[in-house]
């Protein structure tokens, strides 16, 4: 059984700059992002698109985020009509604009090393026959499948309620008519399964498994196409997630809440907690339950978490254990200090990476700064990188934070991994960068590439 990888959609963080949206997603513990191409984040029509794509690619790599590219931006092509034009628009010029956007998306996906590019058919236009619409869709999909194959990109076609292809049966028919091209995969939205499919969401997963390259997830009610937070709809998530693991799905499972940008970080944290709880293996679930009633069990449970939990989920389970502690403030910090003092490097990294979650829950304040400062004094680049995350960016004073950033440069930790660099940089930090670069040059040693733009 494979373990699942969680992502979060940038269309649920539209009030954030893209750089900071990625910081939030990675800082909370997601390992992937569903990146929607739009004016707010990555504009597919930007004049310096190639440079922007390269910049985002570096950022994703530094933060350890996998990516799928989404093309469902509402007003990317027409400021007056949502999701228009589409691949089934009778007007050839309008249809060509959508096709151009998707070809751009393929090139962007290739540049980001994305796992998939997701797109949909569009809604039927009044007056156009279903046969004509299907023919136009086939023409567009055939061209995209060939382009994606050449670029080494997997397409994830998404059945969407209210569109020409709205369900799994429609996707299967379209795929067969196209001759089942290898690059023509499926994006499955779990909420859409609940909304309109005759089968249960877990049955839809089994049916879709052979073509599945991308999964979107949220809660939803039968017959109502409204993306809801987990627990606000009708879906029973544990069977769905178990089925995804059982069929061997290895792609991202990305939260799709495009109308929750006003509470983005909080919603993202609640969503991640819900997914982790719904997919917890028996040992992890029992450990969390035990810890809530007896915090003294922490050290023992924390030490064996990586071995007892499902393979590859040690970090997730350790985060859940720390979040389960029924204490906060200085008391919580004291427990974490004691745990940190006796932990090995991997366990310390897990503690440091969980601090942003505890901070987002307003449970620890600045009480954990001694652990950050200790990690920054080490010569372990992994510890230094973990210490230079969102918690340090929020709580370290400017002088210490500058030294932390310079330590990252000295140790070869990518600046793209440093949280808050754009918003906290100041003339003194730039002066320190320049002095470091001058010293390296004078010694005949190379200046790190990511430092060059600053000096």
Image (cartoon, rainbow, N blue to C red):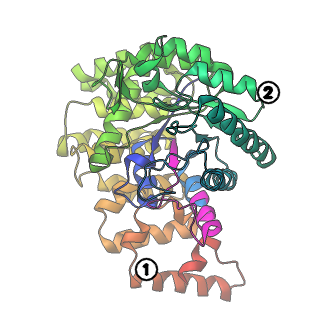
Q: Say which element carries label 2.
A: loop
Q: Position of residue 208 (x, y in %)?
A: 61, 19
Front position in the image: 232 or 278: 232
- Is 282 in front, or is 344? 282
The quarter of the image holding the C terminus is bottom right
Residue at 48% over, 57% down: 78
Number of disc labels: 2
Q: Position of residue 172 (x, y in %)?
A: 66, 21
In the image, residue 52 lies in the stretch drawn in magenta: yes
Between 232 and 77, the residue placed more toward the observer is 77
Calculate the distance from the C-alpha at mark 1 to the C-alpha at mark 2: 57 Å
Q: Which residue is mark 2?
A: 179
Residue 340 as seen in the image, left or right of residue 59: left
Where residue 227 appears, as percent x and y from the top left, is 36, 33
Q: Position of residue 349 (x, y in %)?
A: 46, 45
The residue that appears at 29% across and 18% down in the rendered structure is: 289
Residue 397, compared with residue 132, is above or below; it is: below
Residue that label 1 marks: 429
Closer to viewer: mark 1 or mark 2: 2
Membership of 262 in magenta stretch: no
Q: Residues within 10 Å of mark 2 (few under 14, many from 20)?
A: few
Q: What kind of element bears circle 1?
A: helix
Which segment did they paint magenta?
Answer: 32-57
- Residue 139 seen in this snapshot: yes
Please tell me in which quadrant of the rendered image residue 451 appears: bottom right
Q: Badge 1 local density, few (<14 within 10 Å), some, or many (20+)?
A: some
Q: Nearer the viewer, residue 409 or 51?
A: 51
């Amino acid at each position: 059984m494979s373990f699942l990888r969680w992502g979060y959609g940038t269309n649920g963080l539209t009030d954030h700059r893209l750089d900071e949206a990625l910081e939030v997603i990675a800082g909370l513990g997601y390992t992937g992002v569903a990146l929607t191409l739009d004016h707010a984040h990555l504009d597919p029509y930007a004049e310096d698109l190639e440079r922007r794509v390269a910049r985002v690619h570096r950022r994703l790599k530094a933060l350890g985020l996998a990516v799928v590219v989404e093309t469902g931006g509402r007003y990317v092509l027409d400021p007056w009509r949502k999701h228009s034009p589409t691949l089934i628009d009778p007007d050839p010029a309008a249809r060509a604009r959508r096709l151009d956007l998707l070809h751009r998306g393929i090139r962007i996906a290739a540049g980001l090393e994305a796992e998939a590019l997701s797109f949909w058919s569009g809604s039927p236009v009044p007056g156009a026959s279903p046969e004509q619409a299907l023919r136009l869709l086939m023409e567009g999909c055939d061209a995209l499948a060939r382009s994606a194959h050449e670029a080494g990109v997997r397409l994830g076609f998404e059945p969407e309620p209210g569109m020409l292809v709205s369900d799994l049966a429609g996707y299967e028919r379209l795929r067969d008519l196209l001759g089942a091209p290898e690059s023509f995969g499926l994006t499955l939205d779990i909420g859409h399964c609940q909304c309109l499919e005759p089968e249960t969401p877990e049955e839809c997963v089994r049916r879709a498994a052979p073509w599945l390259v991308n999964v979107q997830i949220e809660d939803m009610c039968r017959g109502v196409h409204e993306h809801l937070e987990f627990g606000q709809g009708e879906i029973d998530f544990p069977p769905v997630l178990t089925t995804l693991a059982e069929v061997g799905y290895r792609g991202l499972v990305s939260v799709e809440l495009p109308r929750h940008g006003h509470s983005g970080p909080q919603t993202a944290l609640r969503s991640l907690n819900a997914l982790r709880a719904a997919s917890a293996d028996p040992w992890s679930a029992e450990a969390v339950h035990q810890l809530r009633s007896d915090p003294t069990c922490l050290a023992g449970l924390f030490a064996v978490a990586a071995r007892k939990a499902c393979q590859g989920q040690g970090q997730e389970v350790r985060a859940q254990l720390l979040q389960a502690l029924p204490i906060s403030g200085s008391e919580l910090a004291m427990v974490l200090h004691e745990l940190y003092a006796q932990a090995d490097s991997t366990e310390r990294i897990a503690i440091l990476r969980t601090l942003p979650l505890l901070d987002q829950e307003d449970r620890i304040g600045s009480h954990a700064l001694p652990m950050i400062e200790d990690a920054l004094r080490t010569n372990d680049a992994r510890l230094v990188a973990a210490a230079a995350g969102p918690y340090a960016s929020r709580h370290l004073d400017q002088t210490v934070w500058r030294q932390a950033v310079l330590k990252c440069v000295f140790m070869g930790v990518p600046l793209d991994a440093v949280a808050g660099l754009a918003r906290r940089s100041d003339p003194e930090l730039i002066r320190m960068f320049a002095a470091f670069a001058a010293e390296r040059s004078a010694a005949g040693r190379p200046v790190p590439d990511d430092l060059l733009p600053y000096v």
